[in-house]
């Protein structure tokens, strides 16, 4: 059994309730499903990673309001947005051209 002691109260909050913490970003990613162009709102100064279903990272960008996935094959992709404060939001996107 692994025992960890966490002394940072903010980290404890994120571990206990990651969904609530992520929702504080009010991030919107649309449309979903998409034909290739995705709009991102309210992401601030963030890092954006797009990965395929195998977990392979296919895009790594700093703050963009528009993502172009038109040159990728149809399928499911995962967008991970990491804010400058460390809050992470993940979304599943269906690309269907």
Image (cartoon, helix red, strand yellow):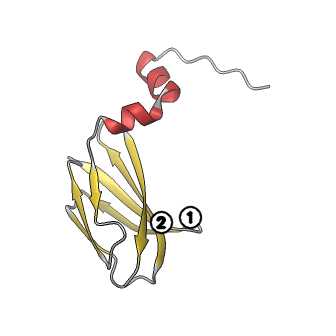
Q: Is residue 86 visible?
A: no
Cα separation, mark 2 vs mark 1, equals 6 Å
From the image, tell me which residue sits under label 1.
55
> Which corner quadrant holds the N terminus?
top right
Q: Residue at x 44, y 36 (%)?
A: 19
Q: What residue is rendered at 45% in x and 22% in y?
A: 13
Q: Residue at 31% across / 62% down in the picture?
A: 61
Which residue is situated farthest in the right direction here? 1
| Residue 87 higher or lower than 7, as above or below | below
The one nearer the camera, 40 or 97, is 97
What is the crowding at mark 1: few (fewer than 14 residues within 10 Å), some, or many (at least 20)?
few
Q: Position of residue 68 (x, y in %)?
A: 28, 75
Identify the element where label 1 is drawn.
Answer: loop
Pick the front one: 17 or 14 = 17
Q: Which residue is label 2 attached to?
A: 51
Q: Position of residue 74 (x, y in %)?
A: 45, 81
Asked if residue 97 shows in the view, the reply is: yes
Q: Which mark is residue 37?
A: none
Mark 2 crowd level (few <14, some 14–19, many ≥20, 10 Å Cα): some
State the quadrant of the C terminus: bottom left
Q: Total label count?
A: 2
Residue 45, position as x, y percentages in the image: 22, 47
Q: Nearer the viewer, residue 16 or 59?
A: 16
45 with respect to 14 (left or right): left
Vertical position of residue 33 compared to residue 9: above or below:
below
**44 on left or right of 20:** left
Q: Residue at x 42, y 51 (%)?
A: 90
Side (left or right) of 16 relative to 88? right
Q: Are marks 2 and 1 in contact (CB under 8 Å)?
A: yes
Please state the horizontal and vertical placement of residue 47, each as a whole percent of the image.
32, 53
Label 2: state its secondary structure. Answer: strand
């Amino acid at each position: 059994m692994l025992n960890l002691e966490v002394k940072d109260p903010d980290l404890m909050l994120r571990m206990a309730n990651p969904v609530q913490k992520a929702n504080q970003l009010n991030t919107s990613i649309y449309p979903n499903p998409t034909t290739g162009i995705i709009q991102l709102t309210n992401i601030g100064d963030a890092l954006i990673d797009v990965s395929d279903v195998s977990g392979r990272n296919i895009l790594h960008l700093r703050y963009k309001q528009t993502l172009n996935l038109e040159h990728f094959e149809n399928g499911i992709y995962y967008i991970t947005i990491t804010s400058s404060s460390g809050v992470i939001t993940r979304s599943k996107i269906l690309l269907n051209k």
